[in-house]
Amino acid sequence: MVFRFLLICLITLLPFSTSNDKVSYPACEYNGIKLQGKVKFVTSFPDLKIKFVESFPDIKVKFVDHFPDNCGEWQIVESFPDFTVQIVESFPDIKVKVVTSFPGKP
């Protein structure tokens, strides 16, 4: 009887103990990739696959022209990127919402 009770408690509490945060804050990174800086959009072999969403993003991104120094600030470049990104509709690594102010943690 006690064993069943403990098993039921474990099964019901397990989903609450696991973390669904894909982006680690305040480091602002995903799998060791800093989510700030110069980014190049590619169609194959990306460092990161993203999906643009309007609700429930993993990170809010602001596209800037210069000095992408803060979390969530991305500058689009064609050469010497800090990381590469592919836009996908299915199975993204992270979900991104484009904003004009307050980038970073949603």
Image (cartoon, helix red, strand yellow):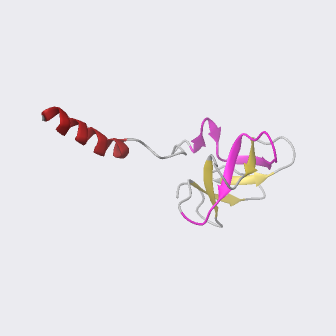
Q: Which residues are magenta?
A: 28-55
Where's the N terminus, which quadrant? Answer: top left
Residue placed at 66% from the left, 55% from the top? 51
Residue farthest along the top direction in this orientation:
3
User: Would you say residue 71 is visible in this rendering?
Assistant: no
In this rendering, is residue 6 above or below 54? Answer: above
- Whether residue 91 sits left or right of residue 14 in the image: it is right
**What is the quadrant of residue 101 in the picture?**
bottom right
Q: Nearer the viewer, residue 100 or 70?
A: 100
Q: Is residue 13 left or right of residue 40?
A: left
Residue at image coords 49%, 46%: 21
In the picture shown, does residue 21 fall above or below 105?
A: above
Q: Quadrant of residue 96?
A: bottom right
Tell me the residue at 75%/41% (across/down): 46
| Count of numbered circles on the image | 0
Residue 52 locus on image (x, y percent): 66, 60
The question of residue 71 being in magenta is answered with no
Residue 94 appears at what percent x and percent y?
61, 49
Q: Is residue 9 left or right of residue 30?
A: left
Residue 31 within the magenta-colored segment of the rendering:
yes
Residue 88 appears in view? yes
Q: Is residue 62 above or below residue 49?
A: below
The image shows residue 42 at horizontal and vertical percentages of 81, 47
- Furthest-left residue in this view: 1
The quarter of the displayed image where residue 5 is located: top left
79 and 55: which is toward the camera: 55
Residue 25 x %, y %: 51, 45
